């Protein structure tokens, strides 16, 4: 995206910051040897006395180990046909959402990020710029047993195991993340 567009978007987001509150997220991550998929629910509250039609900028992490973003979707689970993807590239996505006055909405946003190896990431640090964290947040990461996790930026609360995969689970309350969700891994060869 051009720098001017990013500046305009940031100005729009800041002007709506007092009106729009992003208060919760429940995300499901899936890791394979070549991709990282994010699929989750994002909960927004319009604290203003008028309906908001808002353009949201959804950034994607940047690293030489990351390939193309090949899929992005956005759906308003509370009000069908009131959210959509305007455009996306490998830097971020522009999403449009409409929220009634003094009401909440649940957005489902998903994307698939191709990986070149060894690392996957989800941006959480931007939450600190809002000055308030999430009231609640939950995350889970599912991966095949052929993937060995080397490091995680956050220690999980639980582990579930099936015959072929693992699921790590995080539950947070009053969560103001100061770093991104980062997974470093290697794929074991048969």
Image (tube, helix red, strand yellow):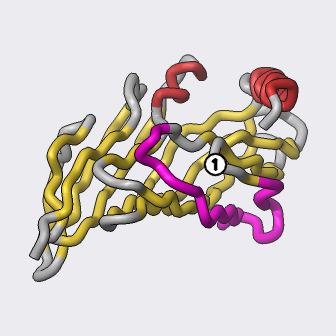
Q: Which corner quadrant of the image does residue 44 belong to?
A: top right
Membership of 117 in magenta stretch? no
Q: Which residue is mark 1?
A: 90
**In this orientation, which residue lies closer to the viewer: 77 or 153?**
153
| 150 relative to 163, above or below | above
Indicate the position of residue 33 as horizontal and vertical percent values. 31, 65
Q: Residue at x 59, y 49 (%)?
A: 43
Q: Residues within 10 Å of mark 1 (few under 14, many from 20)?
A: some
Magenta residues span 63-87
Q: Quarter of the image for the C terminus: give it.
A: bottom left
**In this orientation, which residue lies closer to the viewer: 88 or 136?**
88
Left or right of 12? Residue 65 is left
Left or right of 160? Residue 142 is right
| 92 relative to 16, above or below | below
Q: Quarter of the image for the N terminus: give it.
A: top right
| 165 relative to 177, above or below | below
Indicate the position of residue 163 as horizontal and vertical percent values. 11, 82
Q: Residue at x 65, y 34 (%)?
A: 21
Q: Main secondary structure of the magenta part?
A: strand
């Amino acid at each position: 995206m051009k720098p001017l567009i990013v500046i305009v978007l940031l100005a729009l987001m800041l002007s709506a910051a007092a009106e729009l509150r992003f208060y919760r997220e429940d995300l499901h991550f899936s890791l394979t040897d070549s991709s990282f998929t994010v699929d989750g629910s994002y909960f927004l509250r319009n604290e203003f006395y008028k309906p908001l039609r808002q353009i949201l900028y959804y950034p994607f992490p940047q690293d030489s180990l990351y390939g193309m973003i090949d899929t992005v979707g956005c759906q308003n689970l509370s009000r069908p046909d009131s959210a959509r993807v305007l455009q996306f590239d490998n830097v971020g996505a522009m999403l449009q959402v409409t929220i009634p006055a003094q009401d909440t909405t649940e957005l489902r946003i998903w994307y698939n990020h191709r990986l070149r190896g060894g690392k996957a990431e989800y941006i959480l640090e931007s939450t600190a710029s809002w000055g308030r964290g999430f009231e609640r947040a939950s995350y889970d990461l599912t991966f095949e047993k052929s993937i060995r996790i080397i490091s995680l930026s956050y220690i999980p609360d639980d582990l579930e195991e099936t015959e072929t995969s693992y699921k790590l689970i995080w539950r947070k309350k009053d969560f103001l993340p100061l770093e991104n969700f980062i997974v470093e891994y290697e794929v074991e060869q048969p």
